[in-house]
Image (cartoon, rainbow, N blue to C red):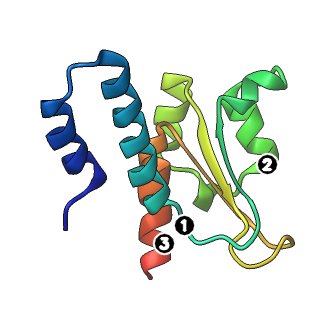
Amino acid sequence: MTTDAELLEAQVATSTDPQRMKRMAVEAAVRDFVKLLPPHKASLTIQHNAHIDVYLSIRDYLEDIAHPDDVIDYESLIKGNELWSVQVYPSTPIGSYTIYGPTLESVMLRIIEENQT
């Protein structure tokens, strides 16, 4: 199966316009990213460093809102001071889950793993 990124590489090889190349790269990356999103019949929210908006440390922020099973690599979160989260309403606007991690990649990988079981 050919990914959008692979198709882009072929198109970029024949293009000389830098703006067009950048636009094509962004479009391909977004298309590939959207394919990775978990199924959701209501909303899906991606946040980065939401703890800063409410003047809390990551430790205090997670203590108030997160279940320990929903946190990836707690110690890396504290040391790195980077917090990514993805909240998904898979079936209805009532039930949701949120995964927290030090990188968007780690959060997305956990969500993909959980949706395969």
On screen, residue 60 versus residue 79, left or right, reads: right
Camera-near label (2 vs 1) is 1
Task: Identify which residue, 24 or 44, lies in the foreground.
Answer: 24
Residues marked 3 and 1 touching at CB (< 8 Å): no
* Image quadrant in which you'd find residue 23: top left
Q: At 25% across and 42% down in the image, what residue appears?
A: 8
User: Alpha-carbon neighbours of circle 2 within 10 Å: few (<14), some, or many (≥20)?
Assistant: few
Estimate the x, y position of residue 2 in percent, counting from the top left: 20, 61
Residue 65, which numbered label? 2
On screen, residue 71 versus residue 113, left or right, reads: right
Residue indicated by mark 1: 38
Task: Identify which residue, 73 or 8, lies in the foreground.
Answer: 8
The quadrant the N terminus occupies is bottom left
Task: Give the answer, above or below, for where 2 lies relative to 20.
Answer: below
The quadrant the C terminus occupies is bottom left
SS at mark 2? helix
Cα separation, mark 2 vs mark 1, equals 22 Å
Mark 2 is on which residue type? Ile
Mark 3 is on which residue type? Glu
On screen, residue 30 versus residue 58, left or right, reads: left
SS at mark 3? helix
Please tell me which of labels 3 and 1 falls first in the chain: 1
Please tell me which of labels 3 and 2 falls first in the chain: 2
* Image quadrant in which you'd find residue 27: top left
Cα separation, mark 3 vs mark 2, equals 20 Å
Residue 114, which numbered label? 3
Estimate the x, y position of residue 18 in percent, counting from the top left: 30, 17
Estimate the x, y position of residue 111 in percent, counting from the top left: 50, 63
Cα separation, mark 3 vs mark 1, equals 10 Å
Please tell me which of labels 2 and 1 falls first in the chain: 1
Task: Give the answer, above or below, for where 34 lies relative to 97.
Answer: above
Task: Give the answer, above or below, for where 88 lies relative to 17.
Answer: below
